[in-house]
Amino acid sequence: MIPIVYVGQLQGAADRLTNQFDEAAKGIGLVKEAQDVRVVFIKPNLTFPSYKTGVTTRAEFVEELAKLLLRSNPRLKILIGEGEGGYNSFSMTAAMQNMGFAAIAERHANVEIVNLSRVPKRSVELATPKGPYALDLPELFFTDVDVSISCPLPKIHCMTTLTLSYKNLWGCLPDVMRLQNHYMFPLIISRIAEALKFRYAFLDGKYGLTRQGPMSGDVVELNWFVAANSLGAFDAVVAKMMGFDWRTVPHLRQAGRYGYVPEERAMNILGSPETLARPFHMRRGFWTYPALAAFHSKHLTHLFYVSRYAKVMHDVMYMFRKRDILPVDTGEE
Protein backbone atom coordinates (compact mmCIF):
# COMPACT_ATOMS: atom_id res chain seq x y z
CA MET A 1 0.00 0.00 0.00
CA ILE A 2 1.33 3.44 -0.92
CA PRO A 3 1.67 5.61 2.23
CA ILE A 4 -0.85 8.44 1.80
CA VAL A 5 -0.97 11.48 4.09
CA TYR A 6 -3.81 14.00 3.88
CA VAL A 7 -3.00 17.46 5.29
CA GLY A 8 -5.30 20.46 5.55
CA GLN A 9 -6.61 23.30 7.68
CA LEU A 10 -9.06 21.92 10.27
CA GLN A 11 -12.57 22.99 9.31
CA GLY A 12 -14.62 24.66 12.03
CA ALA A 13 -18.16 24.44 10.67
CA ALA A 14 -19.82 21.06 11.34
CA ASP A 15 -20.81 20.38 7.72
CA ARG A 16 -17.36 21.33 6.44
CA LEU A 17 -15.67 19.12 9.03
CA THR A 18 -17.90 16.23 7.96
CA ASN A 19 -16.86 16.81 4.36
CA GLN A 20 -13.21 17.00 5.41
CA PHE A 21 -13.40 13.64 7.19
CA ASP A 22 -15.08 12.12 4.12
CA GLU A 23 -12.49 13.51 1.73
CA ALA A 24 -9.55 12.45 3.89
CA ALA A 25 -10.89 8.97 4.57
CA LYS A 26 -11.53 8.35 0.88
CA GLY A 27 -8.08 9.67 -0.01
CA ILE A 28 -6.25 7.35 2.39
CA GLY A 29 -8.41 4.30 1.64
CA LEU A 30 -10.23 4.04 4.96
CA VAL A 31 -13.75 4.28 3.47
CA LYS A 32 -13.09 1.30 1.23
CA GLU A 33 -11.55 -0.79 4.02
CA ALA A 34 -14.34 0.07 6.48
CA GLN A 35 -16.84 -1.51 4.10
CA ASP A 36 -15.10 -4.89 4.41
CA VAL A 37 -14.45 -5.18 8.16
CA ARG A 38 -16.55 -5.90 11.24
CA VAL A 39 -14.82 -4.11 14.14
CA VAL A 40 -12.73 -0.93 14.25
CA PHE A 41 -10.86 0.27 17.34
CA ILE A 42 -10.22 3.99 17.93
CA LYS A 43 -7.52 5.07 20.39
CA PRO A 44 -7.73 8.70 21.59
CA ASN A 45 -5.07 10.24 23.85
CA LEU A 46 -6.66 10.40 27.31
CA THR A 47 -3.67 10.90 29.56
CA PHE A 48 -5.60 13.08 32.04
CA PRO A 49 -8.75 12.34 34.10
CA SER A 50 -10.74 15.19 32.54
CA TYR A 51 -10.60 17.11 29.27
CA LYS A 52 -7.54 19.37 29.11
CA THR A 53 -6.91 21.64 26.13
CA GLY A 54 -3.86 20.54 24.16
CA VAL A 55 -3.45 17.45 26.34
CA THR A 56 -6.40 15.14 25.61
CA THR A 57 -8.18 14.25 22.37
CA ARG A 58 -11.55 15.95 22.01
CA ALA A 59 -14.61 13.70 22.20
CA GLU A 60 -16.29 15.62 19.37
CA PHE A 61 -13.36 14.86 17.06
CA VAL A 62 -13.57 11.13 17.79
CA GLU A 63 -17.34 11.17 17.35
CA GLU A 64 -16.93 12.74 13.91
CA LEU A 65 -14.57 9.90 13.00
CA ALA A 66 -17.04 7.33 14.35
CA LYS A 67 -19.85 8.86 12.28
CA LEU A 68 -17.66 8.71 9.17
CA LEU A 69 -17.05 5.00 9.76
CA LEU A 70 -20.75 4.32 10.29
CA ARG A 71 -21.62 6.18 7.09
CA SER A 72 -19.16 3.90 5.31
CA ASN A 73 -20.57 0.75 6.93
CA PRO A 74 -23.75 1.00 9.07
CA ARG A 75 -23.17 -2.54 10.38
CA LEU A 76 -19.70 -1.73 11.69
CA LYS A 77 -18.94 -2.06 15.39
CA ILE A 78 -16.70 0.68 16.80
CA LEU A 79 -14.70 0.37 20.01
CA ILE A 80 -13.23 3.51 21.62
CA GLY A 81 -10.74 2.69 24.32
CA GLU A 82 -7.81 3.59 26.53
CA GLY A 83 -5.99 1.95 29.41
CA GLU A 84 -5.22 3.13 32.93
CA GLY A 85 -1.59 3.89 33.59
CA GLY A 86 0.91 6.04 35.39
CA TYR A 87 2.32 5.96 38.89
CA ASN A 88 -0.74 7.85 40.19
CA SER A 89 -3.23 6.23 37.84
CA PHE A 90 -6.86 7.30 37.68
CA SER A 91 -10.02 5.50 36.64
CA MET A 92 -10.22 5.45 32.85
CA THR A 93 -13.87 4.46 33.04
CA ALA A 94 -14.60 7.66 34.97
CA ALA A 95 -12.34 9.71 32.69
CA MET A 96 -14.17 8.56 29.55
CA GLN A 97 -17.43 9.44 31.25
CA ASN A 98 -16.14 12.89 32.29
CA MET A 99 -14.79 13.73 28.85
CA GLY A 100 -17.90 12.79 26.90
CA PHE A 101 -16.78 9.53 25.32
CA ALA A 102 -19.39 7.46 27.11
CA ALA A 103 -22.02 9.82 25.70
CA ILE A 104 -20.86 8.91 22.17
CA ALA A 105 -21.80 5.31 22.87
CA GLU A 106 -25.18 6.43 24.18
CA ARG A 107 -25.88 8.29 20.93
CA HIS A 108 -24.70 5.52 18.60
CA ALA A 109 -25.86 1.94 19.08
CA ASN A 110 -22.82 0.44 17.31
CA VAL A 111 -20.26 2.27 19.47
CA GLU A 112 -18.82 0.81 22.69
CA ILE A 113 -16.43 2.34 25.24
CA VAL A 114 -13.65 0.05 26.50
CA ASN A 115 -11.37 0.39 29.51
CA LEU A 116 -8.39 -1.60 28.26
CA SER A 117 -7.18 -2.26 31.80
CA ARG A 118 -10.38 -4.19 32.57
CA VAL A 119 -10.41 -6.69 29.71
CA PRO A 120 -8.72 -10.10 29.28
CA LYS A 121 -5.06 -10.03 28.29
CA ARG A 122 -2.85 -12.10 26.02
CA SER A 123 0.89 -12.54 26.43
CA VAL A 124 2.80 -11.85 23.22
CA GLU A 125 6.45 -11.73 22.25
CA LEU A 126 7.67 -8.75 20.25
CA ALA A 127 10.80 -9.03 18.12
CA THR A 128 13.43 -6.42 19.07
CA PRO A 129 17.18 -5.96 18.46
CA LYS A 130 17.67 -7.17 22.04
CA GLY A 131 15.71 -10.35 21.41
CA PRO A 132 12.06 -11.31 22.00
CA TYR A 133 10.27 -9.14 24.57
CA ALA A 134 7.22 -10.54 26.37
CA LEU A 135 4.31 -8.19 27.00
CA ASP A 136 0.64 -8.47 27.97
CA LEU A 137 -1.76 -6.83 25.50
CA PRO A 138 -5.58 -6.71 25.41
CA GLU A 139 -7.05 -9.92 24.00
CA LEU A 140 -9.77 -8.15 22.02
CA PHE A 141 -7.23 -6.85 19.48
CA PHE A 142 -6.46 -10.45 18.52
CA THR A 143 -9.99 -11.88 18.62
CA ASP A 144 -12.34 -9.04 17.64
CA VAL A 145 -10.65 -6.01 16.10
CA ASP A 146 -10.00 -5.92 12.35
CA VAL A 147 -8.33 -2.51 12.07
CA SER A 148 -7.25 0.16 14.57
CA ILE A 149 -6.96 3.96 14.35
CA SER A 150 -4.75 6.24 16.47
CA CYS A 151 -6.13 9.73 17.28
CA PRO A 152 -3.32 11.74 18.92
CA LEU A 153 -2.65 15.44 19.38
CA PRO A 154 0.59 17.18 18.37
CA LYS A 155 2.50 17.40 21.66
CA ILE A 156 6.01 17.75 22.97
CA HIS A 157 6.86 14.92 25.38
CA CYS A 158 9.67 15.47 27.86
CA MET A 159 10.61 11.76 27.80
CA THR A 160 10.09 10.74 24.15
CA THR A 161 10.44 14.16 22.43
CA LEU A 162 7.06 13.91 20.69
CA THR A 163 3.67 12.36 21.28
CA LEU A 164 2.08 11.44 17.96
CA SER A 165 0.36 8.35 16.57
CA TYR A 166 2.92 5.80 17.83
CA LYS A 167 3.44 7.21 21.33
CA ASN A 168 -0.35 7.45 21.74
CA LEU A 169 -0.51 3.64 21.65
CA TRP A 170 1.34 3.28 24.96
CA GLY A 171 -2.10 3.59 26.55
CA CYS A 172 -3.04 0.25 24.99
CA LEU A 173 -0.87 -1.52 27.56
CA PRO A 174 -3.36 -2.66 30.20
CA ASP A 175 -0.93 -2.78 33.14
CA VAL A 176 -1.30 0.24 35.44
CA MET A 177 2.44 -0.10 36.10
CA ARG A 178 3.31 -0.16 32.40
CA LEU A 179 6.06 2.34 33.19
CA GLN A 180 8.20 -0.68 34.06
CA ASN A 181 8.47 -1.21 30.29
CA HIS A 182 9.70 2.34 29.57
CA TYR A 183 13.31 1.31 29.10
CA MET A 184 12.19 -0.74 26.08
CA PHE A 185 9.82 1.90 24.70
CA PRO A 186 11.78 2.93 21.56
CA LEU A 187 12.22 -0.71 20.58
CA ILE A 188 8.65 -1.93 21.11
CA ILE A 189 6.13 0.85 20.46
CA SER A 190 6.05 0.42 16.67
CA ARG A 191 5.96 -3.37 17.14
CA ILE A 192 2.92 -2.87 19.39
CA ALA A 193 1.28 -0.84 16.61
CA GLU A 194 1.80 -3.71 14.19
CA ALA A 195 0.53 -6.34 16.63
CA LEU A 196 -2.62 -4.35 17.43
CA LYS A 197 -3.43 -3.62 13.76
CA PHE A 198 -3.01 0.14 13.84
CA ARG A 199 -3.07 1.13 10.17
CA TYR A 200 -4.60 4.61 10.26
CA ALA A 201 -4.10 7.86 12.16
CA PHE A 202 -6.20 11.02 12.45
CA LEU A 203 -4.75 14.09 14.15
CA ASP A 204 -6.95 16.14 16.46
CA GLY A 205 -4.90 19.20 15.62
CA LYS A 206 -7.09 22.01 16.88
CA TYR A 207 -4.62 22.49 19.74
CA GLY A 208 -1.08 21.36 20.43
CA LEU A 209 1.27 21.44 23.41
CA THR A 210 4.80 22.84 23.29
CA ARG A 211 7.69 23.34 25.75
CA GLN A 212 7.15 20.49 28.22
CA GLY A 213 4.45 17.87 27.76
CA PRO A 214 2.75 15.52 27.87
CA MET A 215 0.45 16.96 30.55
CA SER A 216 1.76 20.47 31.15
CA GLY A 217 3.26 23.04 28.82
CA ASP A 218 2.15 25.85 26.55
CA VAL A 219 -1.07 25.33 24.61
CA VAL A 220 -1.00 26.53 20.99
CA GLU A 221 -3.98 26.78 18.67
CA LEU A 222 -3.09 25.17 15.34
CA ASN A 223 -6.21 24.01 13.51
CA TRP A 224 -4.35 21.19 11.76
CA PHE A 225 -6.10 18.20 10.19
CA VAL A 226 -3.88 15.28 9.21
CA ALA A 227 -4.87 11.71 8.33
CA ALA A 228 -2.81 8.83 6.99
CA ASN A 229 -2.88 5.12 6.17
CA SER A 230 0.59 4.69 7.72
CA LEU A 231 1.52 5.62 11.28
CA GLY A 232 5.14 6.00 10.26
CA ALA A 233 4.32 8.38 7.41
CA PHE A 234 1.88 10.29 9.64
CA ASP A 235 4.45 10.81 12.42
CA ALA A 236 7.17 11.80 9.97
CA VAL A 237 4.98 14.46 8.33
CA VAL A 238 3.52 15.87 11.55
CA ALA A 239 6.96 15.89 13.22
CA LYS A 240 8.24 17.98 10.31
CA MET A 241 5.28 20.36 10.68
CA MET A 242 6.34 20.75 14.34
CA GLY A 243 9.94 21.50 13.32
CA PHE A 244 11.48 18.07 14.02
CA ASP A 245 13.27 15.61 11.79
CA TRP A 246 11.74 12.24 12.65
CA ARG A 247 15.19 10.66 12.62
CA THR A 248 16.10 12.64 15.75
CA VAL A 249 13.23 11.05 17.70
CA PRO A 250 14.49 7.69 19.10
CA HIS A 251 11.30 5.64 18.77
CA LEU A 252 10.65 6.96 15.24
CA ARG A 253 14.25 6.30 14.23
CA GLN A 254 13.83 2.71 15.42
CA ALA A 255 10.50 2.41 13.60
CA GLY A 256 12.38 3.51 10.50
CA ARG A 257 14.93 0.75 11.03
CA TYR A 258 12.05 -1.73 11.19
CA GLY A 259 10.81 -0.38 7.88
CA TYR A 260 7.69 1.36 9.22
CA VAL A 261 8.64 4.96 8.31
CA PRO A 262 8.84 5.62 4.57
CA GLU A 263 11.00 8.29 3.03
CA GLU A 264 9.05 11.40 2.04
CA ARG A 265 9.66 10.74 -1.65
CA ALA A 266 7.81 7.42 -1.26
CA MET A 267 4.71 9.09 0.24
CA ASN A 268 1.72 10.55 -1.54
CA ILE A 269 1.07 13.77 0.38
CA LEU A 270 -2.31 15.33 -0.31
CA GLY A 271 -2.02 18.97 0.72
CA SER A 272 0.78 21.33 1.69
CA PRO A 273 2.11 20.63 5.21
CA GLU A 274 4.77 23.33 4.85
CA THR A 275 2.10 26.07 4.71
CA LEU A 276 0.77 25.00 8.13
CA ALA A 277 4.10 24.31 9.84
CA ARG A 278 4.71 25.94 13.21
CA PRO A 279 7.89 25.24 15.22
CA PHE A 280 7.53 23.55 18.61
CA HIS A 281 10.28 23.49 21.21
CA MET A 282 11.25 21.52 24.31
CA ARG A 283 12.46 22.96 27.60
CA ARG A 284 12.69 20.37 30.34
CA GLY A 285 12.12 21.35 33.96
CA PHE A 286 14.43 20.40 36.82
CA TRP A 287 12.32 17.47 38.02
CA THR A 288 12.12 16.06 34.52
CA TYR A 289 15.71 14.84 34.60
CA PRO A 290 15.40 12.19 37.36
CA ALA A 291 12.29 10.87 35.58
CA LEU A 292 14.14 10.90 32.26
CA ALA A 293 16.99 8.87 33.76
CA ALA A 294 14.48 6.34 35.11
CA PHE A 295 12.66 6.23 31.76
CA HIS A 296 15.76 4.78 30.12
CA SER A 297 16.81 2.46 32.96
CA LYS A 298 15.10 -0.70 34.16
CA HIS A 299 16.94 -0.53 37.49
CA LEU A 300 16.22 3.15 38.19
CA THR A 301 12.55 2.60 37.29
CA HIS A 302 12.40 -0.14 39.92
CA LEU A 303 14.12 2.09 42.48
CA PHE A 304 11.92 5.16 41.85
CA TYR A 305 8.56 3.44 41.38
CA VAL A 306 8.53 -0.12 42.71
CA SER A 307 11.05 -0.51 45.53
CA ARG A 308 10.32 0.05 49.22
CA TYR A 309 11.98 3.46 48.91
CA ALA A 310 9.66 4.68 46.13
CA LYS A 311 6.93 6.25 48.28
CA VAL A 312 9.39 8.14 50.46
CA MET A 313 11.24 9.45 47.41
CA HIS A 314 8.02 10.66 45.79
CA ASP A 315 6.74 12.23 49.00
CA VAL A 316 9.96 14.23 49.23
CA MET A 317 9.77 15.26 45.57
CA TYR A 318 6.18 16.47 45.90
CA MET A 319 7.18 18.72 48.76
CA PHE A 320 8.84 20.83 46.06
CA ARG A 321 6.64 20.34 43.00
CA LYS A 322 2.96 20.00 42.12
CA ARG A 323 1.53 16.63 41.13
CA ASP A 324 0.38 16.49 37.50
CA ILE A 325 -2.38 14.01 38.34
CA LEU A 326 -3.99 13.35 41.68
CA PRO A 327 -5.14 9.79 42.37
CA VAL A 328 -8.89 9.41 41.98
CA ASP A 329 -10.91 7.15 44.25
CA THR A 330 -13.97 6.06 42.26
CA GLY A 331 -15.02 3.18 44.46
CA GLU A 332 -14.35 0.71 41.64
CA GLU A 333 -12.99 -2.68 42.61
Image: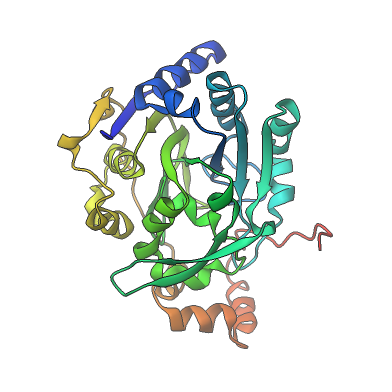
Horizontal side of 184 relative to 310 (left or right) equals: left
* Residue located farthest toward the top when viewing the structure as drawn: 15
Q: How many labels does the image show?
A: 0
Image quadrant assignment for residue 248: bottom left
Residue at the spot 72% in from the left edge and 38% down from the top edge = 102
* Residue located farthest toward the right when viewing the structure as drawn: 331
User: In the rendered view, would you say 25 is above or below 262?
Assistant: above
* Relative image position of residue 98 (x, y in whole percent): 73, 42
Image quadrant assignment for residue 237: top left
* Residue located farthest toward the bottom when viewing the structure as drawn: 308
Q: Can residue 12 be seen in this view?
A: no
Residue at the spot 36% in from the left edge and 43% down from the top edge = 231
User: In the rendered view, would you say 117 is above or below 133?
Assistant: above
* Relative image position of residue 318 (x, y in whole percent): 61, 71
User: In the rendered view, would you say 70 is above or below 286?
Assistant: above
Horizontal side of 250 relative to 58 (left or right) equals: left
**Residue nearest the viewer, comparing 59 with 215:** 59
* Figure quadrant of the C terminus: bottom right
Residue at the spot 51% in from the left edge and 33% down from the top edge = 37
* Figure quadrant of the N terminus: top left
User: In the rendered view, would you say 177 is above or below 241?
Assistant: below
Horizontal side of 9 relative to 144 (left or right) equals: left
* Relative image position of residue 168 (x, y in whole percent): 47, 49
**Residue nearest the viewer, comparing 272 with 2:** 2
**Residue nearest the viewer, comparing 221 with 41:** 41
* Relative image position of residue 299 (x, y in whole percent): 45, 84
Q: Can residue 255 be seen in this view?
A: yes
Residue at the spot 72% in from the left edge and 50% down from the top edge = 93
Horizontal side of 178 relative to 154 (left or right) equals: right
